[in-house]
Image: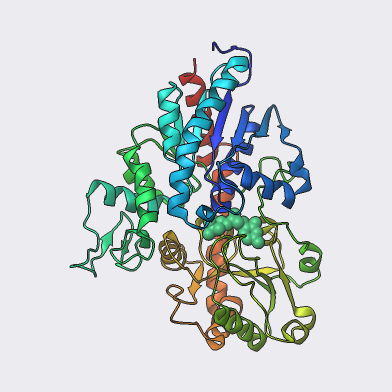
Amino acid sequence: MASNNDAPTRVLMVSFPAQGHINPLLRLGKHLAAKGLSVTFSTTESIGKDIRAATSANNALHWRIGAGSLTFEFFEDGLSDDDPMRKNLLDYTVQLERVGRKVISHMIKKHAESNGLFSCIINNPFVPWVCDVATELGIPCALLWIQSVAVFTAYYHYFNKSLPFPTETDLYLDVPLPNVVLKHDEIPDFLHPFSPFPFLGKLILEQFKNLSKPFCILVDSFEELEFDCVKYLSKHLLVRPVGPLVKDPTHGNGVIRGDMVKVDDCMGWLSSKAPSSVVYISFGSVVYLPQEQIDEIARGLLMSKVSFLWVLKPPRRNLGLEPHVLPEGFLKQTSEGGKVVQWSPQEEVLAHPSVACFLTHCGWNSSMEALTFGVPVITFPAWGDQVTNAKFLVDVFGVGVRLGHRQAENKVVTGHEVENCLLKAMVGDTAEVLKRNALKWKDAADTATAHGGSSYRNLDAFVADIKTRSM
Ligand code: UDP
């Protein structure tokens, strides 16, 4: 299993099979390939099928990128497409770990027979066992944390009990992070005593139990954006912010995308619109709004008369959800002013000059993408880190207005509230301040990723780390 010194440095990436996990890890893979590494990107075959169906270009499984390469290698998770276990995230993660430990270990050994051991294995959250497999085989491993540094800091404190968090008997406790105090309902809500999804908090904390194994924590963020939390964590861990990863090192020439839904063509339509005239609406890949909330957003759009590009994604297969319907005649009433798609090329949309603002659920990928392209946001978080991201977008980064503190099943935000928020974020004094701040962060992101910038240096340092460790 000896490695050949002339061969490119080889890295294996293992992603949890979800869109918000795949996108940042795949983007990191492209960056590493552009720096000359040979990257194998692995996730489940069930997702591989979706990715291949969504993007015909992805039928190719291997790409050359600069001096390096990126290859998809999917693995079976042992379940049929319609297995009920896919509906239950808790059961599914147990199954994935059971099968994944064996399959990934086998994959590594098989590669080693012809090319030697991988020099590094990189995983994202929800598959912490990948670090065990790497360690058992003597391979250095790293974690790509796919949420903010602030949210990592909150989990770090919670895990180490270094700050008190709200409990059932002390619900209203504030949590002071290095640069901001989070109120009880602004902490990542999987850590809240009454979280509707406590097992997701436990799943994320499994990664913190394993934190001695990765030699480095990479983050899709940049130092200038989260300076205080990076400084705090760096006293304890090797943290390297390398974002925004969405800034494509192949400048769009690498057709590799990880979309699990076919992208609808909307760029021509967007180009027909005036500069800064369109609100882009998307709630990511998982959040699925109640039908009544869709009706109210539609009402708000009609009342505001603002142009919009709205992603209404189909419900994920096998979840038993009904597809959303728009109010009768809605699209006719908006005439040329609106377009509804099932899935968009979001980073291209946000980079387009016609987009004025983004109504978002505040997933970290969407938040970083808005900051990267200088787009103000209207925040409408649902759960988890989204509520914390909304707090930062509005009160710390100064680029957003709140539609609702968080989505709640029993409280639908009205069309009037939607209309007010749209107008506030798009015209007048508040809109100008938001845009000014958003452009400031866009410039900072450009600088961080440019030659010699903080993220550029951090990525180079990471590549150097891998090479040194594999000698
Ligand atoms: N996305 C996309 N097209 C869409 C909607 C979303 O490409 O129509 C991408 C978006 O750019 C982001 C990811 O899907 O990279 C969603 O990740 P995020 O963390 O924002 O939310 P999640 O889906 O994890 O809740």
Q: Is residue 253 above or below residue 193?
A: above
Say which quadrant the N terminus sits in: top right
Count of marks placed on residues: 0
Q: In which quarter of the image is ligand 1?
A: bottom right
Q: Is residue 458 left or right of residue 347?
A: left
Q: Is residue 4 above or below residue 281?
A: above
Residue found at x 64% / y 27%: 36
Where in the figure is residue 175, as x and y percent of width and height? 27, 60
Going by the picture, which residue comes out furthest to the left?
Answer: 169
Where in the figure is residue 415, as x and y percent of width and height? 57, 86
Residue found at x 63% / y 42%: 45
Q: In this orientation, which residue lies closer to the viewer: 292 or 305?
A: 292
Where in the figure is residue 42, as x and y percent of width and height? 59, 37
What sort of colour scheme is used for the picture? rainbow
Question: Would residue 295 be seen by someone viewing this image from the given angle?
Answer: yes
Residue found at x 67% / y 86%: 302
Q: Is residue 46 left or right of residue 267?
A: left
Q: Is residue 365 above or below residue 376?
A: above
Question: Would residue 368 be seen by someone viewing this image from the given angle?
Answer: no
Residue 39 found in image quarter: top right
Where in the figure is residue 169, as x and y percent of width and height? 18, 68
Residue 276 found in image quarter: bottom right
Q: In this view, does 417 lie above or below 173?
A: below
